[in-house]
């Protein structure tokens, strides 16, 4: 009897060394949890906090009014906004004011969602898009054009006049006449 | 009875929230409460405006009005003066007051829109703050389905000021300001009930030089400016206190900036100087800093073309050029901080060894230089100079060649306050009674341009004009061109005992006098002609000796460059069109062998200069402006910009290169701070001062007339074509329409338009009849048309011809 085996029971000598293989064997019949990312993308949880999106009204006008409440709410100081005035000749949003500059710095953003809670017009929401990586810092500062929701059918690229109502009140109260082809809302879940 | 006893008898003792407090009689309850640390919410109350009790937000409970009887209902504490034995309970201790304030807040919010996110006031709004601190969380009106009263979104009450009537809570601060402070009551409350609103007179635009103050005192976002509209939120801004650079008043301003850009300027709070008011020019004219024509790197001329250069190279080239050019004249201009002016003064004396330095880039005279040396320099509150407080307390004020509304806004407001509160008598020696003079309740003493001296001399015989030691005489800088006027004013001040002050137009003028940017003055009021003063200055500068003859003034420098006596020129912020003879100045620039320009932006000087240095604007350097009182107004740098060198640093660099070439010595300082320390070390001159020489006997030679010529009277309006107002189209749109003022008799011979012909060109303007203007005098604004009167028409005081120009 070798010195190691001295004083060990029969179970310890024979059963224990193969017991671990039992785990392996059992797992062979279970469902595989490995995800084949990035070859195969899985959907996130529906309320996952991903990249932001600046929404549009059904006629394509922007919902953002450049109020900077998102920038104020941001605990990471990731958002920079400059407002400007809409004119009759050049209108980007209903009402007097729109966001002329809108930047989110994804190097700073912690995707906490306080900004979308602060947004008074639901212009800012979050998508489930999580692929926020790049090989340089500059490209991770998303500008307004990177964040704006794509134009859906029935939408028109601003600047253009208010198509759905006479004034911004119609937009905010939702009393506008919905264009036939436009969807009710294209906000992402948040 | 001592003064302490008098004060004591004037005290009234009352009880606020159970705390006994003694305050001077006449104090309002709302301010007595502030003294025990209780902030009663308020909107309409403003310490500098008369009480009105419009908003009712400051309701307090008064269980004992001082006579043992309670007030039956809560009272507005902003309209009730304190009474002996009064008992007041504010919201801090009284349920009644608290409930009343909550109720008022609910009323105010019934019609107030919920557009705080896009409102420029959001974040610094008294209504927002006090709705949080003294309001209900819910509105019963909205909850029960009430619909807010709405108005169309903002209407322009001037090009600059926008009114959003929905947001207005009818506190009447703006209308009271316009009426009580500025004297431009173009806005007033109209309509009744829920429809009450601020309205304008449709025939008269809201044309006030002080309209921007209404934006600042508006407790909600009802008044906003077109310039600052939606540009940033209050919580983005960093505030730096500063001093306005547009006039010699030394008004305190607050510069709000974001990411290295000035976003807006607000009035600072300085009770001794500008109280809480500034002119629209101080408030809105800062865009000149951000134009495309800003210089950002040194340039040197090579083969006839300017090319970029490094700072050391530019210093060396400038020094070599100045050394080779022979004698050099220095024209620093009048917009410098005292430190930079001191650097120019030192540079001329120490590095160039000349007294040919003159800050006066405008029409001037030898008499003015003598007057500045004898009567102005070193004159402050400490040794008999008037202050703003003296203006307010004066029995009478005489303005000679000064239009305060256009040339010194803070003086205008102070004089208006003195007249309306204390019935101070104001006289103005001027060609006609301006609207500003009417607003100050002043009386005109008519004087043709050039004839002010005899008018001022005649004042002593005029029984109506009373002058004593509680009087103030303010003389404007344009009296330099009126022969004998400054001497006459100085004599009037001496004989009457009145306090005398010289009010220039530019922020740096007085500082340049104090630091010796004059051919006859060294820094600290040391006369060039005084040997001991020269030794004193030379010792302070650490040089062996200084030139002992007074130098050339600006006109003589220009003439000497033209004739070849001077080879080089060092020019600071001088606009050729401001100088006495623009054509001669331009010719001198071309004739000079070597021109060094220190400028902020491209000008006609930098375009022909051999070396161009970009200098730091007031936002990028610390400094001191000396205002008309002689009060030093220090301000810090707003931005840290290592690439922006103040004039002092540039001149120090050139002086060091010059001394390496064996000419002169280094300045002994480089930064603004070092210049300031050296200036303080040098101190004021405590020896003999020069006295004002009597002018030549026949000083009334400038009277024009005959041949159908009329005398040209002119001054610059507050808002005109000045280069420091560039880039702000809304401000420029509020400028007054340039008109040519003539008497009624002359106007009959002309049509609606008149063409003025002078020896430098002609100008066509609409005619405006002005009753008290003499028939042989015509007035035009100095810089509201073309390149200005000096370049396009004739020099002030000379004769011009009028011709009807019907279109």
Image (cartoon, coloured by chain):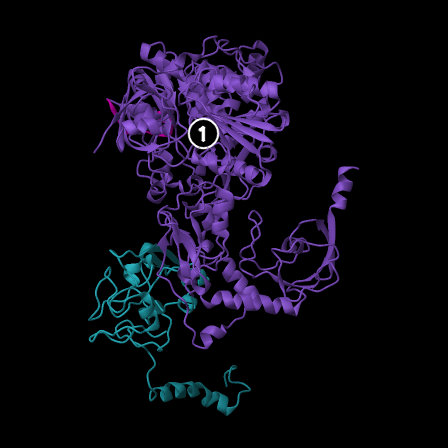
* Number of other residues with Cα within 10 Å of mark 1, as a class: few under 14, some 14 to 19, many 20 or more: many
Residue B575 in percent (x, y) is at 35, 27
In front of the other: A117 or B429: B429
For residue B146, above or below residue B558: below
At 44% from the left and 65% from the top, the residue drawn is: B194
> Is any part of residue B540 visible from this angle?
yes
**Image side of residue B374 versus residue B769, left or right:** right
- Residue at 53 percent across and 61 percent down: it is B129
Q: Which chain is purple?
A: B
Residue B621 in view here: no
Residue B694 image point, x, y percent:
52, 10
**Residue B99, percent across and down?**
60, 69
Tell me the shade of chain A: cyan
Q: Is residue B652 magenta?
A: no
> In this view, which residue lies farthest toward the right?
B1
- Which residue is tagged 1? B505
Q: Chain of mark 1?
A: B
Q: Which quarter shows the C terminus of chain B?
A: top left
Observer-nearest of B113 and B668: B113
Element on which disc 1 rests = loop
The magenta-colored residue range is B304-314
- Give coordinates of residue B161: x percent, y percent: 39, 49
To which quarter of the image does residue B647 belong?
A: top left
Vertical position of residue A12 compared to residue B245: above or below: below
């Amino acid at each position: 009897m070798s010195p190691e085996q001295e004083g060990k029971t029969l179970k310890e000598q024979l059963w224990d060394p193969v017991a671990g293989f039992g785990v392996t064997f059992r797992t062979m019949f279970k469902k595989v949890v490995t995800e084949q990312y990035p070859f195969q993308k899985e959907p996130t949880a529906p309320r996952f906090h991903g990249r932001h999106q600046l929404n549009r009204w059904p006629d394509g006008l922007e919902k953002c009014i450049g109020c900077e409440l998102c920038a104020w709410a941001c605990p990471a100081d990731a958002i920079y906004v400059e407002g400007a005035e809409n004119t009759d000749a050049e209108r980007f949003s209903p009402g007097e004011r729109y966001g002329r500059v809108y930047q989110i710095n994804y190097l700073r953003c912690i995707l906490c969602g306080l900004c979308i809670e602060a947004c008074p017009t639901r212009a800012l929401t979050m998508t489930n898009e999580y692929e926020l990586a790049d090989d340089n810092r500059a490209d991770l500062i998303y500008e307004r054009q990177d964040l704006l929701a794509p134009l859906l059918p029935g939408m028109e690229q601003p600047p253009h006049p208010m198509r759905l109502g006479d004034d911004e009140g119609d937009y905010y109260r939702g009393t506008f006449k919905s264009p036939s082809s436009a969807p009710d809302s294209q906000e992402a879940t948040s | 009875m001592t003064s302490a006893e008098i004060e004591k008898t004037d005290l009234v003792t009352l009880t606020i929230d159970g705390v006994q407090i003694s305050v001077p009689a006449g104090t309002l309850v709302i301010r007595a409460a502030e003294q025990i640390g209780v902030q009663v919410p308020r909107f309409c109350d403003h310490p500098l405006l008369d009480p009105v009790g419009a908003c009712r937000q400051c309701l307090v409970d008064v269980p004992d009005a001082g006579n043992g009887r309670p007030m039956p209902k809560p009272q507005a504490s902003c309209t009730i003066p304190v009474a002996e034995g009064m008992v007041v309970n504010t919201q801090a201790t009284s349920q009644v007051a608290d409930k009343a304030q909550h109720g008022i807040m609910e009323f105010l919010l019934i019609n107030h829109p919920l557009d705080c996110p896009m409102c420029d006031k959001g974040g610094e709004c008294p209504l927002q703050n006090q709705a949080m601190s003294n309001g209900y969380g819910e509105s019963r009106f909205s909850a029960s389905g009430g619909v807010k009263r709405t108005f169309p979104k903002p209407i322009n009450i001037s090009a600059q000021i926008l009114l959003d009537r929905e947001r207005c809570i009818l506190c009447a601060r703006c209308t009271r300001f316009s009426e009580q402070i500025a004297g431009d009551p173009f806005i007033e409350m109209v309509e009744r009930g829920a429809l009450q609103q601020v309205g304008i007179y449709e025939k008269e635009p809201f044309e006030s030089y002080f309209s921007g103050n209404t934006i600042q005192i508006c407790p909600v976002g009802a008044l906003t400016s077109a310039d600052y509209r939606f540009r940033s939120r209050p919580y983005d801004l960093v505030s730096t206190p500063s001093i306005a650079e547009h006039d010699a008043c030394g008004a305190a301003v607050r510069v709000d900036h974001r990411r290295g850009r000035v976003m807006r300027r607000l009035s600072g709070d300085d009770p001794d100087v500008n109280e809480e008011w500034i002119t629209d020019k101080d408030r809105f004219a800062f865009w000149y800093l951000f134009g495309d024509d800003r210089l950002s790197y040194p340039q040197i001329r090579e083969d006839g073309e300017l090319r970029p250069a490094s700072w050391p190279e530019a210093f060396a080239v400038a020094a070599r050029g100045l050394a080779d050019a022979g004698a050099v004249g220095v024209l620093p201009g009048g917009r410098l901080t005292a430190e930079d002016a001191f650097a120019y003064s030192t540079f001329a004396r120490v590095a160039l060894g000349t007294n040919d330095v003159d800050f006066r880039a405008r029409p001037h005279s030898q008499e003015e230089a003598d007057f500045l040396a004898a009567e102005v320099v070193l004159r402050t509150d400490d040794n008999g100079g008037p202050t703003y407080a003296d203006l307010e307390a004066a029995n009478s004020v005489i303005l000679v060649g000064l239009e305060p509304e256009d040339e010194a806004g803070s003086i205008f407001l102070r004089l208006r306050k003195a007249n309306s509160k204390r019935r101070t008598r104001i006289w103005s020696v001027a060609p006609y009674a301006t609207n500003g003079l009417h607003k100050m309740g002043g009386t005109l003493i008519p004087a043709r341009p050039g004839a002010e001296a005899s008018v001022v001399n005649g004042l002593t015989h005029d029984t109506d004009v009373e002058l004593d030691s509680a009087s103030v005489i303010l003389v404007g800088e344009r009296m330099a061109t009126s022969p004998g006027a400054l001497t006459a004013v100085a004599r009037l001040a001496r004989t009457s005992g009145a306090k005398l002050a010289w009010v220039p137009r530019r922020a740096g003028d007085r500082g340049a006098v104090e630091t010796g940017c004059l051919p006859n003055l060294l820094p600290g009021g040391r006369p060039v002609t005084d040997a001991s003063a020269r030794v004193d200055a030379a010792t302070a500068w650490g040089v062996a000796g200084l030139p002992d003859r007074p130098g050339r003034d600006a006109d003589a420098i220009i003439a000497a460059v033209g004739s070849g006596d001077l080879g080089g020129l060092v020019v600071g912020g001088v606009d050729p069109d401001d100088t006495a003879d623009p054509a001669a100045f331009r010719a001198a620039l071309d004739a000079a062998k070597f021109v060094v320009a220190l400028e902020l932006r491209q000008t006609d000087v930098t375009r022909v200069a051999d070396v161009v240095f970009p200098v730091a604007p007031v936002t990028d350097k610390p400094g001191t402006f000396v205002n008309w009182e002689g009060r030093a107004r220090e301000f810090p740098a707003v931005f840290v910009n290592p690439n922006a060198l103040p004039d002092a640093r540039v001149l120090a660099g050139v002086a060091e290169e010059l001394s390496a070439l064996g000419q002169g010595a280094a300045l002994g300082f480089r930064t603004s701070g070092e210049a300031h320390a050296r200036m303080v070390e040098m101190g004021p001159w405590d020896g003999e001062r020069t006295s004002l020489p009597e002018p030549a006997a026949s000083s009334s030679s400038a009277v024009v007339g005959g041949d159908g010529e009329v005398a040209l009277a002119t001054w610059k309006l507050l808002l005109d074509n000045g280069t420091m107002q560039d880039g702000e189209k809304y401000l420029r749109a509020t400028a007054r329409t340039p008109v040519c003022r003539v008497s009624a008799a002359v106007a009959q011979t002309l049509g609606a338009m008149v063409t003025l012909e002078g020896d430098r060109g002609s100008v066509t303007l609409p005619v405006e009849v002005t009753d008290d203007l003499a028939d042989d005098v015509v007035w035009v604004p100095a810089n509201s048309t073309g390149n200005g009167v000096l370049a396009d028409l004739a020099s002030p005081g000379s004769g011009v011809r009028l011709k009807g120009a019907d279109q």
